Amino acid sequence: MINLDKAENAVADLLLALGVDEGEHTRETPRRVAKAWAETLAGYNDDPARHLDRRFSTTHDPGLIIVAGIRLNSTCAHHLLPVTGTATVAYRPRPGDQIVGLSKLARVVHGYARRLQVQERIGHQVANAVQEALNPVGAACVITAEHGCMTVRGVGEPATVTTTHASTGEWGPGHPDLQAVLTDHAASLR
């Protein structure tokens, strides 16, 4: 359960401990930060896989389904800094199976991203959720993201991005469906 008052007090203590007092500019900061973090970590109050519960009939064999260009915003579990990037989610339904609405795949990404995370885990959580809910031939999640812990502190490399991919089912390395997903993901980054 979220306790905004306790979070607000913690932020006030943090600012005090770091010697930050900008007068009127930071007077309301603890409350604003508490609300912002409650929104940023809203994924803990959600089961992202639930978005895959509503399904639709389609043609006998709908083929490969790829949703590329999903904006991803998360928070690094190690430094509490932003992780921002682009995700691609794909799956191939088995002939005769139902499909989910395309926006639901984006909602699954957003649900897992709104937690303290590492990029690799988000991809595996998304691909596994699709695999478990829909039992497709294969599912994948590819993510390319910039990590605040690398760009604004530490090594200080502002142009670096990290790409990870997770796949399930029959989609092993070199599988033609997975290659198509990687190609579409790369195109969404341009």
Image: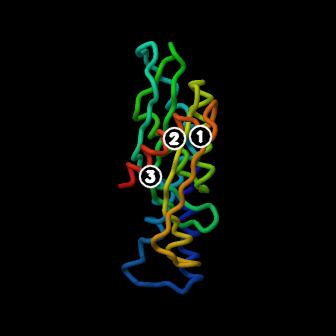
Picture layout, residue 112 above or below residue 28: above
User: 180 or 72, which is in the foreground?
Assistant: 180
Q: Amino acid at mark 1?
A: Gly
| Badge number at residue 151 | none
* Of the two numbered discs 3 and 1 in the rendering, the one whose residue sits closer to the viewer: 1
Please identify the quadrant where the C terminus is shown.
bottom left
Q: Amino acid at mark 3?
A: Thr
Q: Position of residue 7 (x, y in %)?
A: 56, 63
Secondary structure under the numbered disc 2 in the rendered image: helix
Secondary structure under the numbered disc 3 in the rendered image: strand
Residue at position x 57%, y 40% in the image: 126
Which of marks 1 and 2 precedes in the sequence?
1
Secondary structure under the numbered disc 1 in the rendered image: loop
Which of marks 3 and 2 precedes in the sequence?
3
Residue at position x 51%, y 59% in the image: 37
Q: Position of residue 166 (x, y in %)?
A: 60, 44
| Badge number at residue 174 | 1
Q: Position of residue 21 (x, y in %)?
A: 46, 84
Quadrant for residue 100, please give it: top left
Give me the C-alpha separation between circle 3 and circle 1. Answer: 22 Å
The residue beneath circle 2 is: 179
Quadrant for residue 104, please give it: top left
Give me the C-alpha separation between circle 2 and circle 1. Answer: 7 Å
Q: Amino acid at mark 2?
A: Gln
Q: Label 1 near label 3: C-beta < 8 Å? A: no
The residue beneath circle 3 is: 86
Q: Label 1 near label 2: C-beta < 8 Å? A: yes
User: 137 or 151, which is in the foreground?
Assistant: 137
